[in-house]
Amino acid sequence: SSIEQFIEGIPKAELHLHIEGTLEPELMFAFAKRNNIKVNYENVSEVKKAYQFNNLQEFLDIYYAGANVLITEQDFYDLTWAYLIKVKKQNVLHIEIFFDPQTHTDRGIPFETVINGIHKALEHGEEKLGISYRLIMSFLRHLDEASAFKTLEQSLPYKDWITAVGLDSSELNNPPSKFQRVFNKSIEEGYITVAHAGEEGPASYIWEALDLLKVDRIDHGNRCLEDEKLVKRLVKNQVPLTICPLSNLELKVVTNLKDHPIASMLAKNLLVTVNSDDPAYFGGYMNENYIAIARALDLSKRQITDLAKNSIKASWLDDTQKEKLK
Ligand code: ES4
Ligand code: ZN
């Protein structure tokens, strides 16, 4: 349809994507085979049948199990390269993506194996596909502060390759305040900060992310709408929210995409963007997310353009680079 072609045509940036969440079942079986690892499923259709979640935790359990097939630098390279090829076809010109080192270092995979594979693919993508990138190292909030500090130490030799630190995994009962000291140190080391907040957790976690973790963007942030003062602050400071429509639907953050608040967020002048989060698990990459939300909310071309422009604006490209993407 014309709205699909319109979406495919506009330049976009992806600001909320977990590289481990791009592991398609086909690739999972290929890595399992070459690494001699057993997967819990017989075939691709069984895997897809298992991807039904009632909440964030049910998803995370399956997502961490999937990551067990990632062993070698080549695996991380191939995973990242497959994602780059996908978004290249969708006119995504710039990406700022998460990796979760603890998911791998806790299984005995060296930090350097993970980052070398991802970094090589991203460099190759910039050179061969023209996709610019930033890399965000995300701490797992269900683990303790000491583990996050250790991960921060491991990252320091690779500081030039990492722009920001983030915070993800099980949100409830793991407030941003748990990582205030780690984020302080991260800022001292020169990292920008972001955090998942207000996906399942309350609006108070968004306040904490802003005030204690000094974040530049909020990942998700849906529940800001429960707090009028918070919305005012986010609008006034134009703090970007990286919204993930299909993720919200699949994790039951919204029961129906028709109930998704992104249109009213735009109307409130919140700096909202559309992203895919974990596309292999939630059924769609960037354009599928744009198309699903545009159809469900009957978005105008103007609204769609505003969302895409917001993604460039909310990125960490410098102003001259942003101009080139418009
Ligand atoms: C995640 Cl959707 C979401 N929320 C929190 N942590 C995550 N890690 C990967 N996807
Ligand atoms: Zn996420």
Image (cartoon, rainbow, N blue to C red):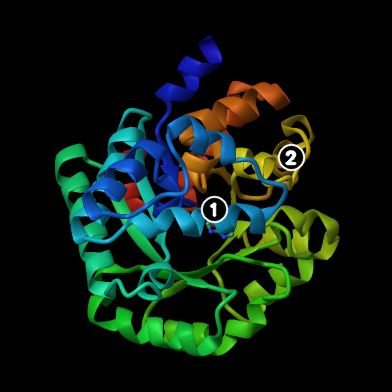
Upstream in the sequence, badge 2 or badge 1?
1
Image height of 297 relative to 119, above or below: above
Residue at 51% from the left image edge and 54% from the top image edge: 63
- Which amino acid type is shown beneath numbered disc 1? Ile
151 left or right of 267 in image = left
Residue at 66% from the left image edge and 83% from the top image edge: 177
174 left or right of 48 in image = right
How many marks the image carries: the answer is: 2
Across and down, in percent, residue 122 comes to 24, 52
The residue carrying mark 1 has its beta carbon less than 8 Å from ligand 1: no
Q: Residues within 10 Å of mark 2 (few under 14, many from 20)?
A: few
In terms of image quadrants, where is residue 181?
Answer: bottom right
Q: Quarter of the image for the C terminus: give it.
A: top left
In terms of image quadrants, where is residue 128?
Answer: top left
Q: Residues within 10 Å of mark 1 (few under 14, many from 20)?
A: some
Q: Is residue 240 visible?
A: no
SS label for mark 2:
helix
Across and down, in percent, residue 209 comes to 64, 73
Q: Which residue is mark 2?
A: 267
Frontmost residue, 139 versus 325: 139
Across and down, in percent, residue 295 comes to 65, 21
- Which amino acid type is shown beneath numbered disc 2? Ala
Q: Where is ligand 1, by quadrant? A: bottom right
Q: Which residue is mark 1?
A: 62
Per the model, the C-alpha gap separating discs 2 and 1 is 36 Å
Residue at 58% from the left image edge and 83% from the top image edge: 179
